[in-house]
Amino acid sequence: MPGDFKKLIPILVVLVFAFAGSYFAFLQYNPEIQNGGGDVKGAKISQESELPMPISSEKISSSRTLNSQQTTFQTKKSPEEVMMFYQNVFSDKNWTPESDKREGGIFVTTYNDQDLLATVTITRQPDDEYTTVSLKMSRR
């Protein structure tokens, strides 16, 4: 048994040095951002979709695809207050309301502006102090 262990010591030493070398090489790695100069699909929508949130709102999540961007946040404002807030925001931007559905405590309103569609979904649980809002901007 002691002879077998002595054979393993050089292998373990090599593995430890290989691990240490790769770890330090990784620490030194500094990736560069490559700018291909080409157009990125969806870049325009990410700039136009920056919509304001009501004061004292807290962002929960945000996701982006080639043709859409969705942001979810919560606020202590009532669903009606949030609905009025976004009616004013889209009215100021000259967007037109396309549909407005209110059922079972869920408000879903869509607005359009030529090639973009904005969907505002507002929900609030009866025993919850927060209203959850989802804003989705997408290309038509």
Image (tube, helix red, strand yellow):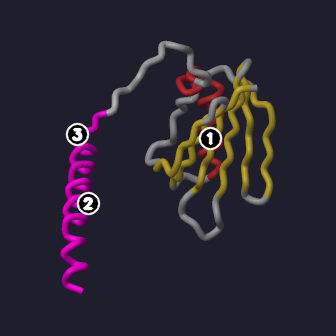
Q: Choose between 35 and 5: the one closer to the eye.
A: 5
Residue 69: horizontal and vertical position, in percent? Answer: 60, 35
Q: Mostly what secondary structure, the magenta segment?
A: helix
State the residue position of label 2: 15
User: What secondary structure is found at the residue carrying circle 3?
Assistant: helix
Residue 74: horizontal and vertical position, in percent? Answer: 53, 53
Q: Which residues are magenta?
A: 1-30
**From the viewer's perspective, is 95 left or right of 52?**
right
Looking at marks 2 and 3 on the same chain, the residue that comes earlier in the sequence is marked by 2
Q: Which numbered disc covers residue 28?
A: 3
Residue 116: horizontal and vertical position, in percent? Answer: 70, 24
Looking at marks 1 and 3 on the same chain, the residue that comes earlier in the sequence is marked by 3
Quadrant placement of the C terminus: top right
Mark 2 or 3: the one toward you: 2
Do callouts 2 and 3 mark residues in contact (Cβ within 8 Å)? Answer: no
Label 2 – label 3 distance at C-alpha: 20 Å
